Image (spheres, rainbow, N blue to C red):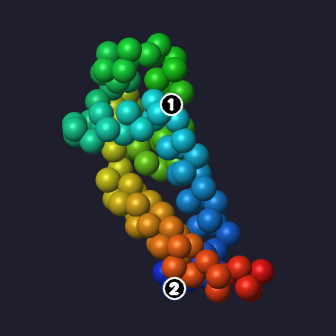
Amino acid sequence: MNECVDSIESCSTAATKDLASRFAALSHPARIEILRYLSGSSSCCCKDVVERLDLAQSTVSQHLKVLVEAGLVRFSPERQRSRYELDREALQDFSSRAAHLIHGCCSGGEEHNSKA
């Protein structure tokens, strides 16, 4: 999935949009707290997160939906209570790609700016 291996310029439009989507999903403090909570369990339901964060169920549901759509959390419908699970592989991929972007910007800023 990592299409940004050689340089910042090598990132495809799709990979760039995916990276931006994941950054956007992590742009709210409640979603970061949800990821932290999910990292400590194999899976949980929305009610578990509501109790942990003291937020309204509808608010937690919306935050979970954003995380699922960004591909950072997996959703599994189960009878009356759906289960949510951290997608550790996707989060690791995001971490690697974000680190690559930041490293590329910090180490080659002048080179990349001269090409613009």
Q: Is residue 58 in view from this perspective? A: yes
Residue, x 77% and y 80% (percent of image)? 116
Side of 49 where 115 appears, left or right: right
The residue to which callout 2 is attached is 6
Q: Secondary structure at mark 2?
A: loop
Picture layout, residue 114 above or below residue 104? below
Estimate the x, y position of residue 60 in percent, counting from the top left.
46, 23
Residue, x 51% and y 79% (percent of image)? 107
Q: Label 2 to label 1, Cα distance in Å?
A: 34 Å
Estimate the x, y position of residue 96 in percent, counting from the top left.
40, 67
Residue, x 51% and y 85% (percent of image)? 6
Kind of residue at disc 1: His
Hey, which quadrant is residue 54 in on the image? Answer: top left
Q: Secondary structure at mark 1?
A: helix
Residue, x 53% and y 51% (percent of image)? 22
Picture layout, residue 64 above or below residue 14? above
Q: Neighbour class for label 2 at 10 Å: few (<14), some, many (≥20)?
A: few
Q: Is residue 78 in view from this perspective? A: no
